[in-house]
Amino acid sequence: MSRRGPQSSSAAKPRAAEAAPATTRGEPLPGNAHILVSGLGVRRADRWLFRDLNLAVPRGAFVAIVGPSGAGKSTLLACLAGALAPGEGTVQIRERSGQLVGPEHCRPRIGCVFQRLLLVENSSVLANVLCGRLGRHRWWQTLFGAPRAEREAAFAIAADLGLAPHTHRWVAELSGGEQQRTAIARALFQEPDLYLADEPISNLDTYLTGRVLGRLRQEASQQSRTVFCVLHDPTLVDRFADLVVSIDPTDPHGWRVRPVRR
Amino acid sequence: MRPPASSPAPAPSSPPTPVFPELPWYRRLDALSVSLLLFGLAIFFSLPTLRGSGRDLDYWENARRFLARFFPPDFSVTPQVLTALAETAQIAVLATAAALVLSFPLGLAGARTLSPRWLVTLARLALNVTRTVPSLLWALIAVAIVGANPLAGVIGLTAYSVGYLGKFFSDAFESVDLDVARGLRAIGASRIQAFQHGVWPHARPLIWSYALWMLEYNLRSAAIIGYVGAGGLGVLLHGYQEYHAWDRFCAVLVFILALVTALDLLGEWVRRKVTKRAARAPA
């Protein structure tokens, strides 16, 4: 069933390593890669979406995930977030201390922009953005709202995405694009080490698309925060990404990792 | 049916015309139509209960004579009624508040999406038992324990309200889409934080509107539990009934009606305000 034998699939790691010079940091790999995916495979119903997926991503890289609908892009993100236990293989994330841990052990440092957004619709934009930092505090510290400094920081990020007039409006009252920007603001406010964004621009116009992806690009380049982003538009991939992971819906071993040459 | 095997396959321009998929009669039987049918049968078999006492009574004349004694209402008792009305309202407010506090943990325990199965079974059983006992009986039990005073009314109505509110709260928690809370968990929130920020904002408007409904219900109940001595308007109602002072009885009813209507309107207004939806969003 596989095109390539197991020995050739292990050659995938050097392939990802080749990508290292294309990244902004250019760190040697996979010795101190930020994200290490090895032998990852996920079964959906009766077929494998992908198998033997190996990936070593340096800190501060912008990784685009591409592939047709139903290929398993969101599933890959769910595995990286630790929300889905893979059928085989492992996902490891290197902490700032150098230690490798599973994603379920560093959730406060993983920022997600979900495809379905998963915002709290009966709360204000500000309250939703503030939710980004829940993981930093104990529950009794967030019981009666966030301190003023945090509220102002959350507002600054929301305002940067053009949400200032909607700060105190309920998310349920916003348009799709405004809701999407709220979800992105929540992830940005979290200041995570790793962004997992599932089609974060699907409801945004050209101007806002550039603004959002530019902001994520900036997070990667300037703050050394790794970004995984599901994207469809090849020109955006070329413009913003360092690495491209493509998933083939017809062949579980058909995934590819390639650097973007600029 | 099929084209002859010898003919070449037709061009993909002519797909076969789909046949309208007619449902057989048994496939059209869903839960709604079956239960409607059963309800119709139940009506038919319940009709024999309307046989009356067998005596030759003039129903209309009886009704006219009895109701005529209610009018005009005698508002000379307004000061006593207002005092009792205030006490009734106090009983209702305290009972609703106590029930809210008690129902919150019970509602959590009874929500199938949040609690383990054994706890749900236990909590729902307890709530069902509580609801089965009528509020008047709860008041009677409370009177037997703390004596004939408004405290008995508060205790009795609290017990009864917990049965309802606990069930409503469970349903409210179950109606919340937990994916939002799971999303918050995925970005590092603890269980309690995910509940407070991901579940509670969605359940809150429902719970508050149920609470207002319960307050209105308790106001009406508090008017009747005085019949067993648990304070409030019921004491007056009972007295007026004993002395056949139906015009005064009617005045009390008018006050209850006014209070309940006011609360209903207020509750409706608050409910509309707290359950904002995207559909009604201003442009």
Image (spheres, helix red, strand yellow):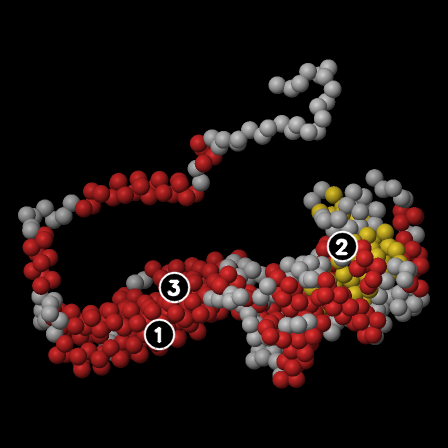
Q: Earlier in the sequence, mark 1 or mark 3?
A: 1
Residue closest to the eye, B276 or A176: A176
Q: Position of residue B147 (x, y in %)?
A: 25, 77
Q: CA distance from mark 1 to mark 3?
A: 13 Å
- Give the labeled residue for mark 1: B95
Mark 3 burial class by Cα count in 10 Å: few <14, some 14-19, many 20+: many
- The answer as to whether the residues below labels 3 and 2 share one chain is no
Q: Amino acid at mark 3?
A: Tyr
Location of the N terminus of chain B (image quadrant): top right
Helix, strand or loop for disc 3? helix
Number of the label disc, if any, that sits on residue A5: none
Residue closest to the eye, A37 or B283: B283
Q: Residue at x 83, y 50 (%)?
A: A255
Q: Chain of mark 2?
A: A
Q: Position of residue B189 (x, y in %)?
A: 65, 70
Q: Residue at x 58, y 66 (%)?
A: A174
- Give the labeled residue for mark 2: A232
Q: Position of residue B62 (x, y in %)?
A: 8, 56
Q: Position of residue A100 (x, y in %)?
A: 83, 67
- The answer as to whether the residues below labels 1 and 2 share one chain is no
The image quarter containing residue B182 is bottom right
Q: Residue at x 74, y 19 (%)?
A: B8
Q: Residue at x 87, y 66 (%)?
A: A58
Q: Chain of mark 1?
A: B
Q: Amino acid at mark 2?
A: His
| Residue A166 seen anywhere in this rendered image of the structure | yes
The image quarter containing residue B199 is bottom right
Q: Is residue B279 left or right of residue A150?
A: left
Number of the label disc, if any, that sits on residue B164: 3
Q: Is residue A197 left or right of residue A25?
A: left
